[in-house]
Image (cartoon, coloured by chain):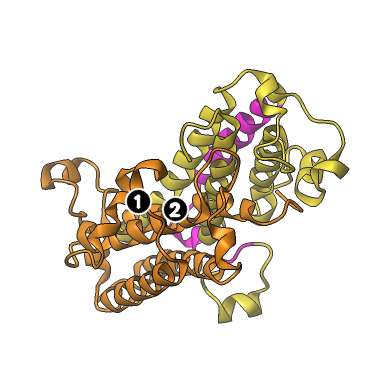
Chain colours: A yellow, B orange
Amino acid sequence: MENQQVKQVVGQVISFWRDNNKNITDFFNKHADEVYAGAVAPGRNSGIYLLAHLVAVSDGLFTILGLGDKLYPELEKFIRESETNAGDQPEVADLKAKWNEINAKLEAEFAKQTTDWWLDRHMSVSEADFALEPNRNKLNVLLSRASHENYHRGQLVFLTRPTQG
Amino acid sequence: MENQQVKQVVGQVISFWRDNNKNITDFFNKHADEVYAGAVAPGRNSGIYLLAHLVAVSDGLFTILGLGDKLYPELEKFIRESETNAGDQPEVADLKAKWNEINAKLEAEFAKQTTDWWLDRHMSVSEADFALEPNRNKLNVLLSRASHENYHRGQLVFLTRPTQG
């Protein structure tokens, strides 16, 4: 039987990820589409580039967690390329639909997993390296991805008119 | 005996907090002092206000975790007040010394604690509310504070010349 405290803590990290997702989802609903085309600060990325980047990174969870293929591998350019090189901006509505689809599918996959699964290695670390660094498990990937959303949310808030930092 | 998996996951969250602290510490060392006086984006907070805010929030961990009094309660104004109302900017070197002192003292306190302690309620939730929402434990506070550092680090990177988002 799974230890209840482990279940509790693993569940907290999943909740943390879910809450951060919700904060980004709220951001998709916050502005008129043209606002997202603007840069978050002078010479920086546009809102839509950052949202596309977040969608692509969440899509990457399928592969790094061993849950299957990415749904939208064509979005990888928003991870690998700068905004200048990534080309055309996608539509906000399209990105939002993909964001919701990816997260719903991830939730469905997560619902099937055990705590042992979460504490096992992720797909980008070898068994040998994992034996030396047991923190490099699937749960840590989710933790770091959730916090990565918060990093970019700190930038996305600058799309609004300056009334707070 | 403590379950090893619980110890593992609690340890991962503490490591996550430590890694985020280190990222902010690196930021304290990154620029000449005058750079921090600038706003991270037009009409937004200065770098030094954000650093003072992060020091004050970390200092608040002592009280919310039930580990004693804040070391620098005079910094609370960088949580409660906007930059305009907070008054004079502190010195970067002074903030950095406080940041290091607070984190070292928190590390020493954390080293004494059990996993049961981490999964017990924090000081801002009542026993009745905690019974209904067991996620509102000390570990969740640390998780959320670590991610809060990442939120503002996403803004602090804008102090540098625009070469990336």
Residue under disc 1 on the same chain as residue under disc 2: yes
Residue drawn at 24 percent across, 78 percent down: B112
Residue drawn at 43 percent across, 70 percent down: B96
Q: Reply above or below: A33 against A50.
A: above
Using a 10 Å C-alpha cutoff, classify the residue at mark 2 as few (fewer than 14 neighbours), some (14 to 19) or many (20 or more): many
Q: Specify the label residue A81 is tagged with.
A: none
Corner quadrant of residue B41 = top right
Q: Amino acid at mark 1?
A: Phe
Q: Amino acid at mark 2?
A: Tyr
Q: Which residue is mark 2?
A: B49
Q: Nearer the viewer, residue A3 or B131?
A: B131
Q: Nearer the viewer, residue B29 or B119?
A: B29
Q: Which residue is mark 1?
A: B78
- The residue tagged with tag 1: helix, strand or loop? helix
Q: Is residue A10 left or right of residue A38?
A: left
Q: Tell me if residue A102 is in the magenta stretch.
A: yes
Residue B121 appears at what percent x and percent y? 20, 54
Q: Which residues are magenta?
A: A95-122
Asked if the residue under mark 2 is in contact with the one under mark 1, i.e. CB atoms within 8 Å, the reply is: yes
Using a 10 Å C-alpha cutoff, classify the residue at mark 1 as few (fewer than 14 neighbours), some (14 to 19) or many (20 or more): many
Magenta region, main secondary structure: helix
* Label 1 to label 2: alpha-carbon separation: 7 Å
Ranked by sequence position, the earlier of labels 1 and 2 is: 2
Residue B91 appears at what percent x and percent y? 43, 66
Residue B48 appears at what percent x and percent y? 47, 57
